[in-house]
Amino acid sequence: MKLDIAQKIVAGAFAAGRSANMKPLSVAVLDDRGALKLVASEDGTSLKRAEIAIGKAHGSLAMGLGSRTLFTRAQQQPYFIAAVPHSVGPLIPVPGGVLILDAAKSVIGAIGVSGDTSDNDEIAALAGIGAAGLTGDPGT
């Protein structure tokens, strides 16, 4: 994923948050290797929101599942989800982590958003992906 695409995604997520009067957001975009392409936080976010956003994106990418699916799995298999970060690194199993898909439906990265409710974080993430002309997979 190129930096200009990540910038469009972040700008789109922030625009969605502002238009819906969400609390200040932090947004992180990772490429398909899990490398951080861009992270930004609006003024007024709490201290560790960026790290949470990175954890949502990283967990989704590492597991190949949107974080809404990880949230459901955490309810069904809490010990498994609690153990996963020891193997794959950060994982925040609540909505707001979304896989980013290209036109061929291949995963090209992931976005994590944190700052408002998890459902609103996911809405902002999907809006950001859409603003870049891509498709998101938040899980089910």
Image (tube, rainbow, N blue to C red):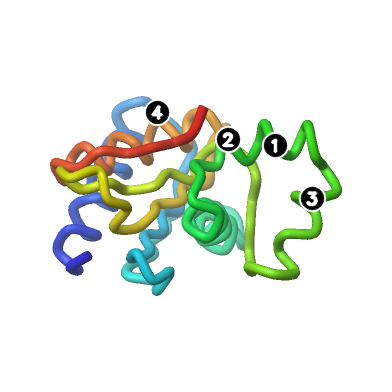
How much space separates mark 4 and mark 2, taking CA atoms?
26 Å
How much space separates mark 3 and mark 1, taking CA atoms?
9 Å
Q: Which residue is mark 2?
A: 69
Inspect the image, locate mark 4, and give the three-letter code of the amino acid beneath it. Asn
How much space separates mark 2 and mark 1, taking CA atoms?
6 Å
Expressed as whole percent of the image width and height from the top left, the position of residue 129 reads 26, 43
- Disc 3 crowd rating (10 Å Cα; few below 14, some 14-19, many 20+) is few
Residue 73 shows which numbered tag? 1
Are discs 3 and 1 less than 8 Å apart at CB? yes
- Disc 2 crowd rating (10 Å Cα; few below 14, some 14-19, many 20+) is some
Say which element carries label 3.
Answer: helix
Disc nearer the start of the sequence (4/3): 4
- Disc 1 crowd rating (10 Å Cα; few below 14, some 14-19, many 20+) is some
Say which element carries label 1.
Answer: helix
Disc number lying in front (4 or 3):
3
For the point 25% across and 38% down, the residue is 135
Are discs 4 and 3 less than 8 Å apart at CB? no
Q: Please tell me which residue lies in front, 102 or 27.
A: 102
Inspect the image, locate mark 1, and give the three-letter code of the amino acid beneath it. Arg
Disc nearer the start of the sequence (4/2): 4
Disc nearer the start of the sequence (4/1): 4
Are discs 2 and 1 less than 8 Å apart at CB? yes
Say which element carries label 2.
Answer: helix
Q: Which residue is mark 3?
A: 80
Q: Please tell me which residue lies in front, 96 or 74.
A: 74
Inspect the image, locate mark 2, and give the three-letter code of the amino acid beneath it. Thr
Q: Please tell me which residue lies in front, 77 or 96.
A: 77
Inspect the image, locate mark 3, and give the three-letter code of the amino acid beneath it. Phe
- Disc 4 crowd rating (10 Å Cα; few below 14, some 14-19, many 20+) is few
Using residue 26 as the reference point, say whether residue 91 is left or right of it. Answer: right
Residue 21 shows which numbered tag? 4
